[in-house]
C-alpha cells in the first residue's frame, strides 16, 4: 500500500500542548515510514467523555470505524489517568476487552500519561491492571507512556510487572516543528520573556502552603521587581487552554499599572490543528520561558530555550527529574518562592548560552534513546502487514 490510513483518537481542541504532541508524533512517523503517505482521520477524545456523550468506545459504530483503517492511534495525552470508576479500564479510554477483540486493526497507545495525582480507587487500579495485562499480551497492541513520571507511577502500582512490556518514551512534543510568523506580540526595543501560568486544579496545585491568590500576588511582585530593574525586557503571557486566561487576568490585576500597559503582552488563545505552530513559534522568540504547564516546559526545552519550571504539580517535577534538570525547578506553591524565583530568573538571563547548550545535549540524548522505540514501532508495523 502506498497510503496508510490512520484513525487518530486524541485531544485536538483542548490544551494546545496536545497539538504539539501530535505535531511531533507525525513528524517522526513521516520520517520512519517514508515514502509512504500518511492519511489521518482525527476523532476528538472529548466526544467519548460523559460530559459530551457523542461517541461510545464500545458501540458497533466505533468497532466498524476502527476496522476501516490500517492503524488506530490513541494519544498522546494524559489518558491513563486512573480516576474513572465507571470505565472498563479505570481511565478515560473506556473500552472493554470484548470490544478490543472485535477490532482487528492494530492499536498504538502512544506516549500516554499515567496519573494518580488526583486520586485512584482500588477498583480503578484493578481494572487498569486487567486492561494492561490484556493489551501487553497481544501483538495487536503497542503501548508506551511518556517521560513525565508515568513509568514510575506504573511501578508504584504494579511493581516490575510491565517493565519489559511498556515503552517509556519522550513526549511527542519534543520532536515538533514550528513556522515563523510576523508576531505582533514582539517589540523591537524589548527582549521577551514568555510566561505560562495555570489556574485549573487549584485545590491540588495550591492546597498546602499557600493559596492561589497568594501565588498570584507573590508572582506579580517578582515580575514588577524584575521589570523595574531590567528596562530592556517585556513579558509575554501565553495561554495554553481557556482557563489560563483567568490566571492571566488575575495576574494583570496585580501588576503595576505602568508595566502592564507598556511592557506586558498577551498572546492569543488558540486551539486546533496548526495553532501550536504559532504559539510555540512565539516561544522561540523569547529569551527564556517560565512555564507552569507540562507542555510549556516540554516545548521550550525541545527548542533549547532556557526554562524555569513554575512547579505546582507532580508531573512537572517528574519531567525535570527524568531529564536530570531539577535545578530548573521552582516550587511556586511553597512560601518564599518569590526570592528563589527572582534570583533564578536573573541568573538564567546571565547564562542563556550555557543553558541552551545543555538543553541541546539533553535533546540529542532523548533522540538517541527514542530511536530504538521508533525502530521497534516500524518493525511492529511490518509484522502487522502495514508496511
Image (cartoon, rainbow, N blue to C red):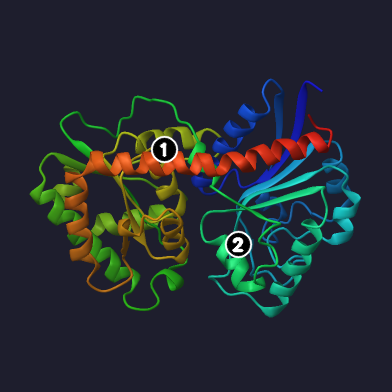
Helix, strand or loop status at disc 2: strand
Report x, y in % for residue 174: 49, 41
Q: Residue at x 64, y 70 (%)?
A: 83
Q: Using a 10 Å C-alpha cutoff, classify the residue at mark 2 as few (fewer than 14 neighbours), some (14 to 19) or many (20 or more).
A: many
Lower sequence index among marks 2 and 1: 2
Q: Residue at x 53, y 47 (%)?
A: 170
Helix, strand or loop status at disc 1: helix
Residue highlighted by disc 2: 114
Q: Residue 313's image quarter?
A: bottom left
Whether residue 264 is visible to the viewer of this picture, yes or no, is no
Q: Nearer the viewer, residue 277 or 111?
A: 111
173 shown above or below 317: above
Q: Using a 10 Å C-alpha cutoff, classify the residue at mark 1 as few (fewer than 14 neighbours), some (14 to 19) or many (20 or more).
A: many
Report x, y in % for residue 149: 52, 61
- Closer to us: mark 2 or mark 1? 2
Report x, y in % for residue 276: 48, 37
* Alpha carbon distance from label 2 to label 1: 25 Å
- For the N terminus, give its image quadrant: top right
144 shown above or below 106: below
Amino acid at each position: 500500500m502506498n497510503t496508510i490510513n490512520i484513525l487518530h483518537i486524541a485531544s485536538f481542541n483542548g490544551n494546545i500542548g496536545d497539538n504539539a504532541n501530535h505535531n511531533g508524533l507525525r513528524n517522526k512517523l513521516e520520517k520512519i515510514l517514508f515514502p509512504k503517505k500518511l492519511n489521518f482521520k482525527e476523532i476528538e477524545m472529548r466526544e467519548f467523555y460523559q460530559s459530551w456523550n457523542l461517541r461510545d468506545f464500545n458501540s458497533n459504530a466505533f468497532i466498524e470505524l476502527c476496522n476501516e483503517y490500517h492503524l488506530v492511534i490513541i494519544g498522546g495525552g494524559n489518558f491513563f489517568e486512573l480516576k474513572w470508576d465507571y470505565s472498563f479500564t479505570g481511565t478515560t479510554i473506556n473500552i472493554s476487552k470484548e470490544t478490543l477483540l472485535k477490532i482487528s486493526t492494530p492499536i498504538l497507545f502512544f506516549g500516554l500519561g499515567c496519573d494518580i495525582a488526583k486520586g485512584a480507587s482500588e477498583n480503578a487500579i484493578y481494572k487498569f491492571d486487567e486492561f494492561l495485562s490484556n493489551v501487553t499480551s497481544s501483538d495487536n497492541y503497542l503501548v508506551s507512556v511518556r517521560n513525565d513520571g508515568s513509568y514510575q507511577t506504573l511501578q508504584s502500582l504494579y511493581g516490575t510487572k510491565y517493565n519489559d512490556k511498556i515503552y517509556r518514551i519522550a513526549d511527542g512534543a519534543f520532536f515538533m516543528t514550528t513556522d515563523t510568523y510576523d508576531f505582533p506580540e514582539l517589540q523591537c526595543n524589548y527582549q521577551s520573556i514568555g510566561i505560562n501560568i495555570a489556574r485549573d486544579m487549584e485545590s491540588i496545585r495550591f492546597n498546602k502552603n499557600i493559596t492561589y491568590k497568594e501565588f498570584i500576588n507573590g508572582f506579580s511582585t517578582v515580575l514588577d521587581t524584575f521589570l523595574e530593574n531590567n528596562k530592556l525586557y517585556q513579558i509575554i503571557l501565553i495561554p495554553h487552554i481557556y482557563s489560563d486566561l483567568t490566571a492571566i487576568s488575575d495576574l494583570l490585576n496585580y501588576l503595576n499599572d505602568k508595566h502592564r500597559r507598556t511592557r506586558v503582552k498577551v498572546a492569543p488563545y488558540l486551539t486546533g490543528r496548526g495553532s501550536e505552530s504559532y504559539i510555540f513559534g512565539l516561544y522561540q522568540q523569547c529569551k527564556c520561558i517560565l512555564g507552569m504547564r507540562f507542555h510549556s516546559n516540554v516545548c521550550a526545552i525541545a527548542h533549547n530555550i532556557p526554562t524555569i519550571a513554575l512547579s505546582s504539580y507532580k508531573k512537572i517535577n517528574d519531567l525535570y527529574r527524568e531529564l536530570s534538570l531539577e535545578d530548573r525547578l521552582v516550587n511556586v506553591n511553597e512560601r518564599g518562592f518569590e526570592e528563589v524565583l527572582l534570583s533564578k530568573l536573573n541568573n538564567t538571563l546571565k547564562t542563556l548560552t550555557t543553558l541552551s547548550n545543555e538543553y541541546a545535549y539533553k535533546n540529542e540524548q532523548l533522540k538517541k534513546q527514542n530511536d530504538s522505540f521508533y525502530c521497534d514501532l516500524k518493525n511492529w508495523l511490518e509484522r502487522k502487514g502495514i508496511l
